[in-house]
Amino acid sequence: MQRKGSQLRDFVTGAKMKVGAFGGLTTKSAMKNLTEEMYDVSTYYHNKGFAQAMARNDKFMNFTLFMIALNTVYIGIDQDNNPADLIFNAPWPFQVCENFFGIFFCVELLLRFLAFKRKRDCLRDLWFKIDSSLIFLMICEMWLLPTLLMVGNSVGKGGPNASFLRLLRLLRLSRMLRALRFMPELVSMVKGMRAAAQAVFTALAMILALMYIFAIIMNMTLKDEPAVRKYFGNLTATMWTLTLDGVLADSPGLVIRLLASSGTWNGQAGLLIFMMFILVSCFFLLNMLIGVLCEVVNTVANREKDEAAVNLVRETILLLLKQFDSDGNGMINQAELRMVMEDSRAVEVLKSLEVDVTYLEELQTMLFIEPDSEVRIHSALELLLTCRGSLPTTVKHMVAGQAFSRWMMCSAMKEQEETIAAQLQAATNKIIALVESGAKPATNLKL
């Protein structure tokens, strides 16, 4: 019985498998690094000081993102209203704005740099390296290169056209990528489009094949029609017409009217073929492509939701579990897990993930068969994630539920067997004692 209970526990927790019974409910990429701590650049910061306080401050970070968005809007205004190529020749409002944005971003990067305890750790942070490169280019475009051009013009040597400096301003737009961290829906959309690239290219290849086939048919039918000869006179012109007017639907009405007014059998046949091509390319293939893209985006969104749940557990409950893991062996016992589950931060996480706490507590009894037994932290976290209320019911849910039911029945039967065995042993010992003492055993002896 003990061995069977251990096997069931291994089945649920995945002790002898790559993933547990519920492993398929969470993406493998999310579960792969479940026990690894989330990367946080603030771990490299000082614990005291003004610079680290500003670098950790969420309000300051949000204000920086606002300034990046404001600078993005300003670039468009500057493009339309600033006639000067050099900042020194621009009207004073543009000079004030340019210098304000430049000074702000330099100060922001300097505060982040000063916040590092060891300055070389700044090379570990990807965003710091990207922002440093962009701010260096901004300094060159705003102050360094204009100064060199003005000095070259003043000494009579001249210089290249300064209009190329405006192109460097477009690099500032790349800083808007920092806002992606605060827009998970947009991240899911971008990842979905990347995942759907294969389906997109397959649909485009199908459209090209249809265009080629229909172009041959229409060229054979309409190449001698004078009204539409410039549209279908050769294969290249026919494919171009099908691309613009058939697939992109630029101005299909013009071609349709010309074919309808031709008054010949070839023109009417060409009209029918052209309408069939529009129907197939626009309504069938493109709608199928949109459907595939939406399905992939939905799949990626669900995956992102799973990864967000895993990251939330790693940021809170994992840290608490490691705090209670005094010996650092990556194992935890039932008492330590119960203390973690009673922590206020853990309770908030469980509520946000819609975890069924009652069911989770019942499953924990399967994890800890012996009073002093320990399990891997990874198994405890995976079991927690399987109790989320938002998860759909799958076959693995049902199999694991049956395994839990069998374990509960086996445990109950084992307890009854132990109770009956103990009572029988006590009665046997009492009878033996009475026999040895020479007394007559009572017929109504209670077991």
Image (cartoon, rainbow, N blue to C red):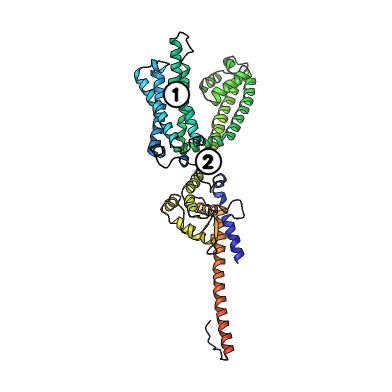
Q: Which image quarter: residue 400?
A: bottom right
Q: In this figure, what is the number of numbered marks?
A: 2
**Where is residue 342 drawn, in percent x and y?**
43, 56
Image point (54%, 78%), residue name: 423
The amino acid beneath tag 2 is Val
342 horizontally vs 333: left or right: left
Residue that mark 1 sits on = 139
**Where is residue 109 drawn, in percent x and y?**
43, 31
Marks 1 and 2 sit apart, C-alpha to C-alpha, by 39 Å
Residue 113, disc: none
Q: Looking at this view, is 27 or 199 the one in front? A: 27
**Where is residue 297 drawn, in percent x and y?**
52, 38
Q: Which image quarter: residue 203?
A: top right
Q: Looking at this view, is 423 or 146 the one in front? A: 146
**Where is residue 90 drawn, in percent x and y?**
38, 16
Badge 2: few (under 14), some or many (20 or more) residues near its Cα, within 10 Å?
many
Q: Looking at this view, is 235 or 220 the one in front? A: 235
- Farthest residue in the top direction? 156
Q: Quadrant of the N terminus?
A: bottom right
Image point (40%, 33%), residue name: 64
SS category of the residue bearing label 1? helix
Foreground disc of the pair 1, 2: 1
Residue that mark 2 sits on = 300
Q: Looking at this view, is 415 or 409 the one in front? A: 415
SS category of the residue bearing label 2? helix
Up the image or down, 122 lies above or below 85; here it is below
